[in-house]
Amino acid sequence: MKSLRRDYPPSVAIDEALARSNLVLLLRCHPEIEIVGECASGMEALRYALRAFDAGALDYLLKPFDNRRFETALGRAKERIAHVRNSPRTGEYIVVKSGRQLTFLKLSEIDWIEAADYYSCLHVGARTHLLRRSMAELDEELDQSLFCRIHRSTIVRLDRVRGLNLNENGDSEVLLNDGTRLRMSRRYRKKLQSHLGLPGTS
């Protein structure tokens, strides 16, 4: 069972152990694919099926199938995933995966985002969530009318900005409604000022 979005890796649901093992071996030939589970019955598969339909399931492999049918289905899924990755994200939430747990975060709940190596840390009130996405990806996909990058390692939600501390040397700060102070680099200063309707601010 393959899913449309990378936040929902595929699960394998086959009642025969040998057939299930063979499909797992085929999937493991593709290192970019992560298998989240194996199911031996329809009842077990139901957990993943419901989640897949929510994610926009793209294809299912029904027995009997050959390698050609498998590659066709997998190729179709990869094409759709590539399309989604290269398209701006217009949804109202981000899915955060931690082990086998999925957390749905509304974009309206996110206060700001900071880089954490190859991950991004989403700040939602007093809570933080680690997302396996780069800042560059998020900067491209988030709605630019709602979020703005202010530093190579920081993105803020514009309606959380309370004020700015602008210094002549370019080392400025962004003040958020909850009192958080975030460093803003000169590179992104004009962009933020424009978003806030302050294009003439020096």
Image: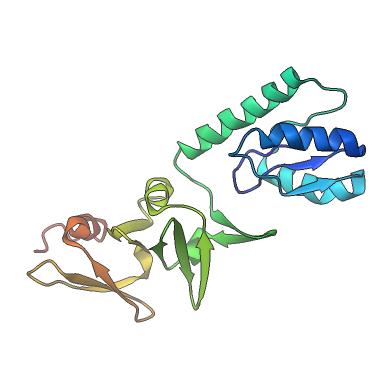
Which image quarter holds the C terminus? bottom left
User: Left or right of 85: which side holds 157?
Assistant: left
Q: Quadrant of residue 98?
A: bottom right
Residue at the (25%, 74%) spot, across then down: 163
User: Left or right of 177: which side holds 50?
Assistant: right
Which image quarter holds the N terminus? top right
* Residue 8 horizontal/vertical position (percent): 65, 47
Q: Quadrant of residue 12?
A: top right
- Give the total number of marks visible in the rendering: 0
Residue 24 or 82: which is nearer the viewer?
24
Residue at the (16%, 60%) spot, across then down: 186
Residue at the (42%, 52%) spot, across then down: 134
As drawn, the residue found furthest toward the top would be 68
| In the rendered image, the vertical position of residue 12 relative to residue 116, given as above or below | above
As drawn, the residue found furthest toward the bottom would be 179
* Residue 54 horizontal/vertical position (percent): 70, 46
Residue 183 or 34: which is nearer the viewer?
34
| In the rendered image, the vertical position of residue 189 relative to residue 33, given as above or below | below
* Residue 127 horizontal/vertical position (percent): 52, 75
User: Left or right of 64: which side holds 96?
Assistant: left
Residue at the (54%, 60%) spot, across then down: 106
Residue 132 or 26: which is nearer the viewer?
26
| In the rendered image, the vertical position of residue 176 relative to residue 91, given as above or below | below
Q: Quadrant of residue 113?
A: bottom left
User: Left or right of 44: which side holds 83?
Assistant: left
